[in-house]
Image (tube, rainbow, N blue to C red):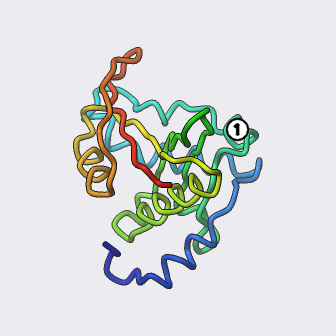
Amino acid sequence: MTPPGEGVGRQQHLQESIRLAGPEEAAAVADLVQRAYQPWVAIVGRRPAPMDDDYPAHVAAREVFVLPRDGRIAAVAVLIDAPDHLMLDNVAVDPDLAGTGLGRVMMDFSEAEARRRGYRDLRLFTNALMTRNIALYERLGFAETHRRQEGAFFRVFMSKPVG
């Protein structure tokens, strides 16, 4: 469902604005992720993994896509090639823009990118305590495939067919 004020044409325009992050944007990407995930610290009981990720390395590997808006980065997606699927490693929206449909735009872009690259599945994982995110991903057509403890994190793995 398209959020209010975000018609199909507007969503298409926003998707067309998404581009690879440049090296000079790695710090801004990291800052956006810090702010987006900060509310989850109290729920998870620690910093969620994306807060400690190596964004300069992801940018150098051409895995970070950004949606610029009004001269700043409004949303990011980290997409990592795997042998048989595209992994949506992280999606984050500037908290000041939460609820404006940008997360959905990034999810739709990620699905389209998986298809463009010839993958049949888009996969992701999230912390099991992030129940709001799990419910959102289910509404977007993702299905839980398994759960697993990885270090200090208990993760829920999900997949969506895209091709």
The residue lying toward the viewer, choosing from 162 and 90, is: 162
In this figure, which residue is indicated by the disc labeled 1? 56
| Residue depicted at x 50% and y 56% | 111
The residue lying toward the viewer, choosing from 140 and 4, is: 140
| Residue depicted at x 57% and y 52% | 114
| Residue depicted at x 47% and y 66% | 105
x and y percentages locating residue 110 in the rendered image: 53, 55
x and y percentages locating residue 157 in the rendered image: 36, 33
x and y percentages locating residue 25 in the rendered image: 70, 52
The correct choice, above or below, for 126 with respect to 152 in the image is: below
Question: Element at badge 1?
Answer: helix
Q: Which amino acid does label 1 sit on?
A: Pro
Report the residue that reaches farthest toward the top.
151
The mark tally for this picture is 1
The correct choice, above or below, for 57 with respect to 141 in the image is: above
- Image quadrant of residue 148? top left
x and y percentages locating residue 53 in the rendered image: 56, 32
Q: How crowded is mark 1: few (under 14 residues within 10 Å), some or many (20 or more)?
A: some
Q: Is residue 18 left or right of residue 134?
A: right
| Residue depicted at x 62% and y 72% | 16
The residue lying toward the viewer, choosing from 154 and 98, is: 154
- Image quadrant of residue 60? top right
Q: Quadrant of the N terminus?
A: bottom left
